[in-house]
Image: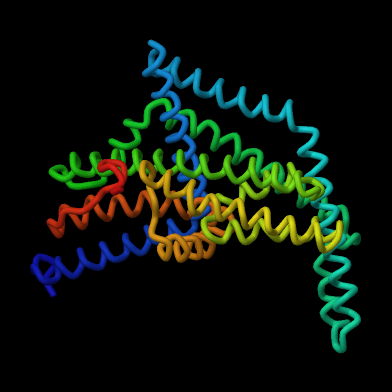
């Protein structure tokens, strides 16, 4: 076959394109952990940029000073919370961890009493951290802590850089599209950023509500370590639908140590707070914030966990928000010419 033959050239181009696509997919698979870190930095930077813009609208500051004020405000809030509740939360979380270990040991001993339960109990005991090979395990733990610390520093720098000039990176992504489609891609990315900002505002409102009222309710019914359990319940709201169920496990284990009445009251408090959140708080927030279809959220969380591990459970929902906006804007509206509601651009239907 002649090298100048159009068919030969088409075959060569197709093979080269297929090889490049395969190489790109392999690189993405190898860099999944890095990609989720980058997306996490984008999520936090979007929230930080939104806070900086809010400050700039109220105080005549430039972009850089508004961002500096937003960073200082976030640091001050975390420092204030740590100063006011740090020692109590540390004590409560330590007590929760000790109770969980005791409950695990009690469960293991209870299972050992059943016929055939000794093998299961032995497997449960081996699941704990063994005391042999302590030095290699300590070295491995130190390496892991060092890696996490380096990743955290890199992510923090990335957050600041992205928040300082989000348009620079948005325009860079738009350059990946054909020239005539770049304005549309830029508009879609702007809409995705606005939707992501709205979603995060709603999420933090729900987290604060759950954390405060779960902690307060558990304290009123004399459940130990109520502040720590409230904090855990608020953080578990990062995982949609599964988080509220998982947050009841430490509450049940801690409350069970005080007797069946405390256990029952603690679970009632958790159910009541989550019911109020689902019946009143979430619908009120959904009128102005971004809401995802329930089935999409559930399967999205599962997919995020399968792709990215535990971190994927946390970032599955914001990934879905961005994906939903881009699909509606670029595919449904532009390719299919079908009008649709686009979160971030259009107000939420009431």
Quadrant in which the N terminus is drawn: bottom left
Report if residue 62 is visible in the image: yes
Asked if 146 appears above or below 98 in the picture, the reply is: above
Residue 280 in percent (x, y) is at 48, 49
Q: Is residue 70 left or right of residue 142?
A: left
Residue 66 in percent (x, y) is at 44, 18
Q: Is residue 173 left or right of residue 148?
A: left
Q: How many marks do you count on the picture?
A: 0
- Colour scheme shown: rainbow
Residue drawn at x 14%, y 70% is 8
Residue 335 in percent (x, y) is at 15, 57
- Looking at this view, is 268 or 345 the one in front? 268
Q: Which quarter of the figure has residue 42?
A: top left
Residue drawn at x 30%, y 38% is 172
- Tell which residue pokes out farthest to the bottom in this image: 115
Asked if 345 appears above or below 331 in the picture, the reply is: above
Residue drawn at x 87%, y 60% is 102
Q: Is residue 283 left or right of residue 71?
A: left
Asked if 38 appears above or below 161 in the picture, the reply is: below
Residue drawn at x 56%, y 55% is 275
Report if residue 175 is visible in the image: no
- Looking at this view, is 320 or 135 the one in front? 320
Q: Is residue 205 left or right of residue 233?
A: left
- Tell which residue pokes out farthest to the top in this image: 60
Asked if 326 appears above or below 128 in the picture, the reply is: above
Residue 21 in percent (x, y) is at 32, 61
- Looking at this view, is 61 or 240 the one in front? 240
């Amino acid at each position: 076959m002649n090298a100048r033959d159009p068919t030969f050239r088409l075959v060569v181009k197709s093979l080269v394109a297929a090889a490049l696509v395969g190489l790109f997919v392999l690189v993405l698979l190898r860099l999944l952990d890095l990609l989720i870190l980058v997306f996490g930095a984008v999520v936090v930077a979007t929230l930080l940029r939104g806070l900086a813009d809010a400050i700039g609208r109220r105080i005549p500051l430039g972009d850089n000073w508004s961002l500096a004020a937003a960073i200082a405000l976030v640091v001050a809030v975390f420092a204030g919370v740590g100063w006011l509740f740090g020692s109590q939360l540390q004590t409560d979380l330590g007590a929760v961890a000790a109770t969980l270990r005791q409950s695990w040991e009690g469960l293991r001993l209870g299972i050992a009493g059943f016929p055939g339960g000794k093998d299961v109990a032995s497997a449960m005991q081996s699941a704990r951290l063994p005391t042999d090979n302590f030095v290699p395990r300590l070295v491995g733990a130190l390496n892991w802590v060092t890696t996490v610390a380096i990743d955290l520093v890199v992510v923090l720098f990335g957050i600041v850089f992205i928040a300082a000039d989000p348009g620079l990176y948005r325009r860079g992504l738009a350059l990946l599209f054909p020239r005539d489609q770049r304005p549309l891609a830029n508009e879609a990315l702007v809409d995705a950023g606005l939707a992501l900002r709205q979603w995060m505002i709603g999420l933090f409102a729900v987290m604060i509500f759950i954390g405060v009222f779960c902690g307060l309710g558990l304290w009123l019914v004399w459940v130990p370590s109520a502040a720590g359990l409230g904090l855990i319940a608020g953080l578990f709201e990062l995982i949609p639908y599964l988080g509220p169920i998982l947050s009841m496990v430490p509450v049940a284990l801690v409350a069970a140590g005080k007797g069946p009445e405390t256990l029952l009251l603690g679970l009632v408090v958790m159910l009541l707070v989550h019911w109020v959140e689902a019946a009143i708080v979430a619908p009120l927030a959904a009128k102005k914030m971004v809401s995802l279809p329930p089935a999409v959220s559930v399967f999205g969380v599962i997919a995020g966990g399968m792709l990215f591990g535990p971190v994927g459970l946390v970032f599955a929902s914001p990934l879905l928000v961005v994906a939903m906006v881009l699909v509606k804007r670029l595919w449904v509206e532009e390719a299919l010419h079908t009008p649709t509601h686009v979160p971030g651009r259009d107000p939420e239907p009431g």
